[in-house]
């Protein structure tokens, strides 16, 4: 369809045949139309500026809100993990270290930064199910008897039950980690006795991170192991307790892993290497 | 003549041109991909409506909450037709509806009102 300006142009082209009166009328129309166009343009510019300002303002708001949500989520998740740990008198640094090791192994195993960062945030919740385990079992200085050990083992399923109802990807991941971090590669773990790659990669990674940190820390029932003793165990458990590929990646990235351990070293370990966690 | 009804879309307003009730109604947003094509049948209908000999009292109701520059130009063209019809003896009232919070809609209404002095142009807060 021709616009009104096209019509004006047509009329102008036909003007040669017209008279002066017609020309003046046409001239007035053209001038009026030009002025209108100019006004429309000015209005449009003004509105565009307003809209763009508003858009930027809203964008900043959305960004701030997103950050707030992410930070809140991280904090809640971390606190939940710390609650789980505090029940067994372990330090908040344990969950920080496990988180750090998990991310290193996640990246090494080929996960992208987003997924690896998610695993870093989800892995501290692996022991959240411990909140349901009685103190007498959790803090028993000696070895657990068979019945006590069965009770203790429930924490994997209970943690999973607590987290599985969430639709949030992070909590879904945490549910998997809680459920599978005590599974062993050769199928001898609990609660389901899953074998090999039937154990989710999140569970296989957290298993290594958790055991490495637990062995290297003083606990109520044992003193920290020397690194060489831990490494020897990891080598012997390659393909048994642990995913063999992940054990290789663990040794390939041992320097990064030790940096994380140093950054979150337990305070009492620094002042008294032979002390207990109590 | 046949009434013309066009349903609203994401980019175009609901339009109801009713020759029995003598009511021309526009409501919603107007930023079509091709504004001139979209409004061509509407402008054609309205021109035909006012070319009929019948003298009537027509109400044009504009409840447009957002529109692009080309739509603005089309509304000027529409009001030109109304003004011409008015000069030919038609009685026409324009109701320009706006939301108190929508400054742009009010400003645009004021602008049209100022430009078409001979039209009976009422700004009505919703």
Image (tube, coloured by chain):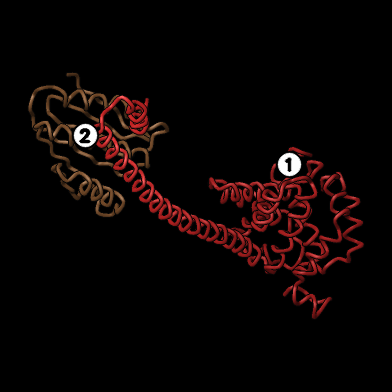
Chain colours: A red, B brown
Height in image: A211 above or below A180? below
Quadrant, the N terminus of chain A: top left
Q: Which residue is mark 2?
A: B25
Locate residue A22, reporting x and y percent.
25, 31
Give me the chain letter of mark 2: B
Residue A28 as seen in the image, left or right of residue A183: left
Where is mark 1, residue-wise? A199
x and y percentages locating residue A26 in the rendered image: 28, 35
In-image side of A152 versus A239 (left or right): left
* Mark pair 2, 1: CA separation: 65 Å
- Considering the image in quadrants, where does the C terminus of chain A appear? bottom right
Q: Quadrant of residue A209?
A: bottom right
Crowding around mark 2 (Cα neighbors within 10 Å: few <14, some 14 to 19, many 20+) is some
Q: Which of labels 2 and 1 is toward the front?
A: 2
Give how far across and how far down residue B10 sits, in percent. 38, 35
Q: Quadrant of residue A139?
A: bottom right
Note whether B106 is above or below B23 in the view shown: below
Name the residue: 9% across, 32% down. Answer: B89
Whether A276 is drawn above or below A238: the answer is below
Q: Position of residue A35 (x, y in %)?
A: 32, 46
As drawn, the label of residue A216 is: none
Res A152 seen here: no
- Residue A63 placement, left or right of A191: left
Camera-side residue: B114 or A104?
B114
User: Dot 1 lies on which element?
Assistant: loop
Secondary structure beneath disc 2? strand
Q: Residue visible at 31% across and 42% down? A: A31
Asked if labels 2 and 1 share a chain, the reply is no
Could you classify mark 1 by the number of other residues whose Cα lies within 10 Å: few (under 14), some (14-19), or many (20 or more)?
many
Q: On what subunit does the disc labeled 1 rest?
A: A
Horizontal relation, residue A161 to residue A253: left or right: left
């Amino acid at each position: 369809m021709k616009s009104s300006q096209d019509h004006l142009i047509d009329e102008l082209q036909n003007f040669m045949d017209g008279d002066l009166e017609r020309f003046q009328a046409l001239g007035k129309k053209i001038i009026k139309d030009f002025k209108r166009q100019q006004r429309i343009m000015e209005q449009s510019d003004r509105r565009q500026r307003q809209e763009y300002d508003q858009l930027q303002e809203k964008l900043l708001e959305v960004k701030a809100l997103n950050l707030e949500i992410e930070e809140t989520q991280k904090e809640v998740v971390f606190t939940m993990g710390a609650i789980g740990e505090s029940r067994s008198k372990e330090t908040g640094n344990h969950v920080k270290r496990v988180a750090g090791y998990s991310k290193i192994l996640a990246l090494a195993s080929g996960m992208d930064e987003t997924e690896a960062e998610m695993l870093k945030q989800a892995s501290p919740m692996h022991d959240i199910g411990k909140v349901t385990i009685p103190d007498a079992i959790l803090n028993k200085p000696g070895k657990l008897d068979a019945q006590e050990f069965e009770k203790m083992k429930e924490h994997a399923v209970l943690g999973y039950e607590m987290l599985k109802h969430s639709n949030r990807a992070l909590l879904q991941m945490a549910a998997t980690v809680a459920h599978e971090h005590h599974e062993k590669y050769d199928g001898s773990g609990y609660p389901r006795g899953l074998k090999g790659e039937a154990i989710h990669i999140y569970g296989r990674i957290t298993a290594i991170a958790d055991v490495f940190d637990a062995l290297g820390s003083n606990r109520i029932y044992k003193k920290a192991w020397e690194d060489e003793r831990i490494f020897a165990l990891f080598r012997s458990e390659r393909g048994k307790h642990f995913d063999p590929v992940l054990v290789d990646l663990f040794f390939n990235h041992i320097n990064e892993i030790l940096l994380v351990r140093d950054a979150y070293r337990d305070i009492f370990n620094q002042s008294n290497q032979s002390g207990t966690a109590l | 003549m046949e009434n013309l009804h066009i349903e609203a879309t994401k980019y175009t307003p609901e339009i109801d041109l009713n020759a029995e009730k003598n009511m021309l109604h526009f409501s919603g947003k107007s930023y079509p991909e091709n504004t001139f094509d979209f409004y061509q049948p509407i402008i054609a209908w309205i021109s035909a409506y006012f070319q009929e000999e019948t003298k009537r009292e027509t109400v044009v109701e504009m409840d447009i909450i957002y529109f692009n520059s080309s739509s603005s130009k089309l509304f000027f063209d529409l009001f030109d037709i109304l003004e011409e019809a008015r000069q030919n003896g038609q009685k026409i009232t324009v109701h320009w509806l706006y939301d108190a919070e929508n400054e742009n809609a009010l400003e645009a209404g004021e602008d049209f009102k100022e430009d078409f002095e001979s039209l009976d142009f009422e700004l009505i807060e919703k």
